[in-house]
Structure formats: structure tokens, C-alpha cells
Amino acid sequence: GENVEQHPSTLSVQEGDSAVIKCTYSDSASNYFPWYKQELGKGPQLIIDIRSNVGEKKDQRIAVTLNKTAKHFSLHITETQPEDSAVYFCAASKSGGTSYGKLTFGQGTILTVHP
Amino acid sequence: GAVVSQHPSWVICKSGTSVKIECRSLDFQATTMFWYRQFPKQSLMLMATSNEGSKATYEQGVEKDKFLINHASLTLSTLTVTSAHPEDSSFYICSARDLDSGGGLGELFFGEGSRLTVL
């Protein structure tokens, strides 16, 4: 089955700096890659996603890049703010039928943004 | 965006009792819901896929008799932890697909999670 590796496990940055979190996946059939932000005691919240037919997607301060050949994708957060501090998870999935939504998650990255 | 509601948000029970957790899609119909389990400081692990009107599909290593899943309607799936033991203490999270979002591919929405503590 799919295996998703996420690095780093912890990331500490100063407010205003950029943060980059990287994930690799094993199943070349995976074609949907969402990123989630999880705050303490809450469920994951989708922040951005990318499908395998594009290489990059941006939404204000957040961007995701995908390299299908290398089977890795990255989350980029620019101009970080203290409220960005949370646990971030990458995930991978195959679309089509009921398998869509069956996500394999990375191990998570604890991002801390210092004021 | 679409909302997925879980109830209860937290529950404490005695060892040996059964606990039911509900997952509701509030403004969309979900033929498929997913149940995840998350231990402290760990990632989410898929337990099972809940299919409306049919049996749930369990991931390898998940005991179907231990974790009973019922998806009786298009807006409700329930997870019952039977004969709960302290090792079942965890954060249980459900997700549901809204087929009308995500450009027709069905965006996934997660509930807020239910924290189970078994004494």
C-alpha cells in the first residue's frame, strides 16, 4: 500500500520567515495530495491540495509543489505568523470510486512560529 | 464550506462498556465516510471506510467486531467501540466526501474529533 514520509517532524521559524515541509510517497498511482493543519484537540483542516495534473498551486501565503517523477510534494508557507503554529500533515490518495478519500497521512510536522 | 459534526466531542467510560460516536454531514449527503484514529502526537490512521447501505470496509489489523460501524443514512455514520479497554483510548476522527464540491471530485471534510478515555 501507500507509504507517505514527512519531514521535518518539528520546524521552528521566526515570524515573517518562510517554512517548508516536504513529503514523499511510494505509490505512483496516487494522484491527490492534500495538506492539513491540525490545532490541538481539533480535527484536521484542509489548507491546500494539488492533483497530479499540475505541478504547483498557490493560495495567498501558501503554496504546494508536486514532482511526480520524484514522487515528492512540498508545502511552502511564506511570511509566517504566530497563528500558523500548528501540526501540519501531508496526505496522498488515489481518486476514483470509493478509494478517493482513503488518505494515507504523513507523520506530521509541528510548526512553531516565534513572534 | 461543508460541515461534518461529531458527537460527543469527548467521552469518559469504564472499562468493559461500549461507546457510540456519531459522525454527521450537516449540509451535504455522504455515501462514503471514513473513520480515523489518532494517538497523542501521532498521525491519523485509517480504520475503516463506511459505506451507506452496506458493510464497512476495515483496514488490515482493525477488529471489525471491536469497532462496529453503521452508515444507515446519507448523513450519519456511527462508530461503536465495544467492550472498551484503556488501550482503546484515543482521538477518533471521521471524514466525509461532498461529491458536489471539489469540481465534482468530492472534497473531503473532517469532523472535529471525539476523544475517548477508557478508565
Image (cartoon, rainbow, N blue to C red):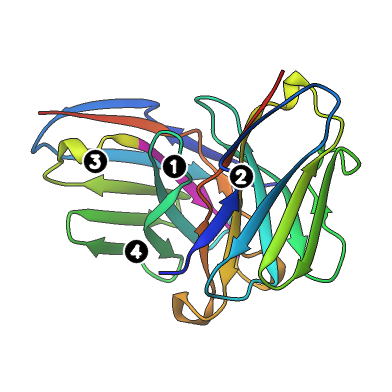
What amino acid is labelled 2 in the image? Pro
Asked whether A25 or A39 is in front, the reply is A39
In contact (CB < 8 Å): disc 2 and disc 4: no
Q: Label 2: chain?
A: B
Q: Chain of mark 3?
A: A
Residue type at mark 3 is: Asp
State whether residue A73 appears in this view: yes
Residue at left 79%, top 22%? B85
Residue B75 coordinates in the image, percent (x, y) = 66, 69
- Disc nearest the viewer among 2 and 4: 2
Label 4 to label 1: alpha-carbon separation: 19 Å
Total labels: the figure holds: 4
Q: Residues within 10 Å of mark 2 (few under 14, many from 20)?
A: some
Q: In the figure, is residue B80 to the left or right of A4?
A: right
Q: Where is residue B52? Give x, y as percent.
A: 77, 69
Residue A84's label in the rendered image is: 3
Q: Which amino acid type is shown beneath numbered disc 1? A: Phe
The percent coordinates of residue A1 (x first, y second) are 70, 46
Q: Are marks 3 and 4 on the same chain?
A: yes
Residue located at (62% from left, 65% from top): A100
In-front residue for pair A40/A73: A40
Report the Cα–Cα distance between label 2 and label 4: 40 Å
Q: Give the residue at mark 2.
A: B8
Of discs 3 and 4, which sits in the foreground?
3
Mark 4 = which residue? A55
Name the side, left or right, on which A70 lies relative to B25: left
Give the residue drawn at x 46%, y 66%: A52
